[in-house]
C-alpha cells in the first residue's frame, strides 16, 4: 500500500516530464505524418487566421491607448451591472472580444484586473463570455472559406453572440445570488484607467501595438501548429479512430465523432474537417460547428490560460461557461433551422 502511494506521488511530480518525453518520442516515431500536419497547420494559420485577425489585433491594441474603454464604461454601466454584474468597462472587453476574436477578450480582461478596474471574481466571469470568435473568422473563414456559404456564416455568428450573452447573464444572476450583492469597483480604479497619451506618442503607440499584435498572432499560430501535430499523433496511433468506432454501435457515424473530437482539441482543424465531410445532413454539420465555436477547444483554453496565469485567475468559470456557450449555440442554431424553413441546409 505504501509503495503504491509512493509511486502515485512520483508519477504526479513527474507527470509533465513523462508527457513531454512521450511527445518527443512520438515526434520522431511519426515524423512523416507530423511534418505534413505541421505544414497544414501553418498553411491554415497563414491563409485563414492571419489575414482575418491580425489587422483587428493591431486596431484593438491602438484603442487600448485611448480613453474609449473609460467613456464606454461610463456609458454602459447602467446595463452591464444589472445584466452581467460587471463594471461598465466590461462592455469594451465584450465588444472587442467579438470584433477581434480569441484571445483579445482575455488580454483586455487581464488588463482590467491589473489596473483594478474589476475584482478577481468579476474578471473570472468576464473571461467566460468576453472571449469569442470574431465575425471575420466565423463568417469569412468558417462560412465562406470552409462551408462556401455566407448564409451559414451569418447563422453561426448570430447564435454565437446570443449564446455568449446568455452565459454572461446567467453568470451575472448566479453571482448576485451567491454573494447576495453586486460587486462595486472603487472610484480610484475607474479614474486610474484614463490614459494620457497624445499625438506626440504616436510612434511609440504604433510600435507597441504592432509588436503586441505580432506576439498574439504568433501565439495563435504556435498553438495551431502544436495541436495539429498532437492530432496527427493521435490519428497515427488510431486513438481518435478507435474512439469514433465505439459510437458506431449506437448508430452515430464515426466521421462525425472523429471530426467532433478533433474540434474539441483544436477548433480550426476541427471545423475544417467537419466542413469537408460529404453528407446529406448539412444542418447537422452546422450545429456541430456551432457547438465547437462556442466551446472553442482545448487549444484556445490553453491560450487563455497562458494569458491569465500571471494573475492567477481561476479557469473554472471559463470552462463551465464555454461548455454552456457551446450547448446554447447548438440549441439556438437548431431552433433557427427548425422555425425558419428557408434556412434549412439539408441537401
Image (tube, helix red, strand yellow):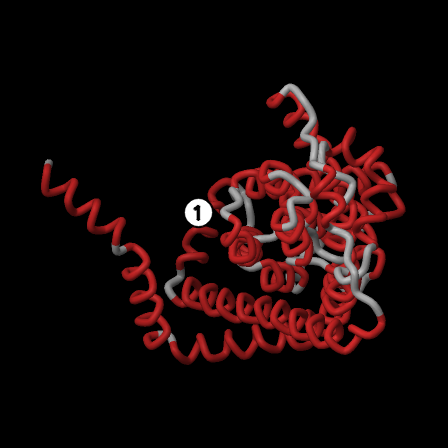
Q: Residue 338 lies in what quarter of the image?
A: top right
Q: Residue 31 lies in what quarter of the image?
A: bottom left
Is residue 346 in view? no
Q: Residue at x 53, y 45 (%)?
A: 313
The residue closer to the viewer here, 275 or 72, is 72
Q: Which residue is mark 1?
A: 246
Going by the image, does 212 lie left or right of 148? Answer: left
| Residue 261, position as x, y percentages in the image | 52, 53
How packed mark 1 is, by other alpha carbons closer than 10 Å (few <14, some 14-19, many 20 or more), is some
| Residue 34, position as x, y percentages in the image | 44, 75
Q: Residue at x 85, y 72 (%)?
A: 199
Count of numbered marks: 1
- Image height of 118 relative to 235, above or below: above
Q: Residue at x 84, y 40 (%)?
A: 76
- Image height of 67 relative to 229, above or below: above
Label 1: state its secondary structure.
Answer: helix
| Residue 172, position as x, y percentages in the image | 69, 31
Q: Residue at x 84, y 33 (%)?
A: 78
The residue closer to the viewer here, 284 or 187, is 187
Q: Residue 329 lies in what quarter of the image?
A: top right
| Residue 179, position as x, y percentages in the image | 61, 23
Going by the image, does 43 lie left or right of 98? Answer: left
The residue closer to the viewer here, 203 or 277, is 203
The residue closer to the viewer here, 121 or 273, is 121
Is residue 104 in view? yes
Quarter of the figure that contains the C terminus: bottom right
Going by the image, does 125 lie left or right of 339? Answer: left
Quarter of the figure that contains the N terminus: top left
Amino acid at each position: 500500500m505504501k509503495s503504491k502511494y509512493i509511486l502515485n506521488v512520483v508519477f504526479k511530480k513527474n507527470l509533465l516530464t513523462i508527457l513531454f518525453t512521450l511527445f518527443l518520442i512520438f515526434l520522431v516515431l511519426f515524423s512523416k505524418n507530423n511534418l505534413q500536419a505541421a505544414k497544414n497547420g501553418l498553411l491554415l494559420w497563414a491563409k485563414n487566421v492571419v489575414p482575418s485577425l491580425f489587422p483587428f489585433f493591431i486596431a484593438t491594441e491602438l484603442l487600448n491607448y485611448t480613453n474609449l474603454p473609460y467613456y464606454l464604461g461610463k456609458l454602459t454601466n447602467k446595463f452591464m451591472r444589472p445584466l452581467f454584474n460587471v463594471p461598465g468597462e466590461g462592455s469594451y472587453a465584450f465588444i472587442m472580444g467579438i470584433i477581434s476574436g480569441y484571445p483579445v477578450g482575455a488580454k483586455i480582461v487581464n488588463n482590467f484586473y491589473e489596473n483594478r478596474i474589476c475584482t478577481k471574481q468579476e474578471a473570472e466571469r468576464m473571461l467566460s463570455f468576453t472571449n469569442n470568435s470574431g465575425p471575420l473568422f466565423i463568417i469569412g473563414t468558417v462560412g465562406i472559406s470552409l462551408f462556401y456559404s455566407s448564409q451559414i456564416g451569418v447563422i453561426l455568428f448570430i447564435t454565437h453572440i446570443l449564446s455568449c450573452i446568455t452565459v454572461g447573464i446567467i453568470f451575472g444572476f448566479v453571482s448576485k445570488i451567491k454573494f447576495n450583492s453586486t460587486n462595486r469597483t472603487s472610484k480610484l480604479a475607474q479614474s486610474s484607467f484614463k490614459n494620457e497619451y497624445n499625438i506626440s506618442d504616436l510612434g511609440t503607440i504604433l510600435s507597441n501595438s504592432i509588436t503586441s499584435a505580432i506576439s498574439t498572432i504568433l501565439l495563435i499560430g504556435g498553438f495551431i501548429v502544436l495541436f495539429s501535430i498532437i492530432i496527427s499523433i493521435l490519428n497515427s496511433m488510431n486513438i481518435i479512430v478507435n474512439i469514433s468506432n465505439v459510437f458506431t454501435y449506437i448508430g452515430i457515424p464515426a466521421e462525425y465523432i472523429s471530426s467532433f473530437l478533433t474540434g474539441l482539441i483544436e477548433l480550426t482543424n476541427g471545423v475544417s474537417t467537419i466542413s469537408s465531410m460529404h453528407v446529406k445532413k448539412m444542418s447537422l454539420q452546422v450545429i456541430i460547428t456551432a457547438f465547437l465555436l462556442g466551446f472553442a477547444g482545448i487549444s484556445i483554453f490553453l491560450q487563455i490560460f497562458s494569458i491569465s496565469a500571471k494573475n492567477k485567475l481561476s479557469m473554472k468559470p471559463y470552462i463551465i461557461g464555454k461548455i454552456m456557450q457551446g450547448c446554447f449555440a447548438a440549441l439556438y442554431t437548431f431552433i433557427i433551422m427548425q422555425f425558419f424553413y428557408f434556412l434549412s441546409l439539408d441537401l
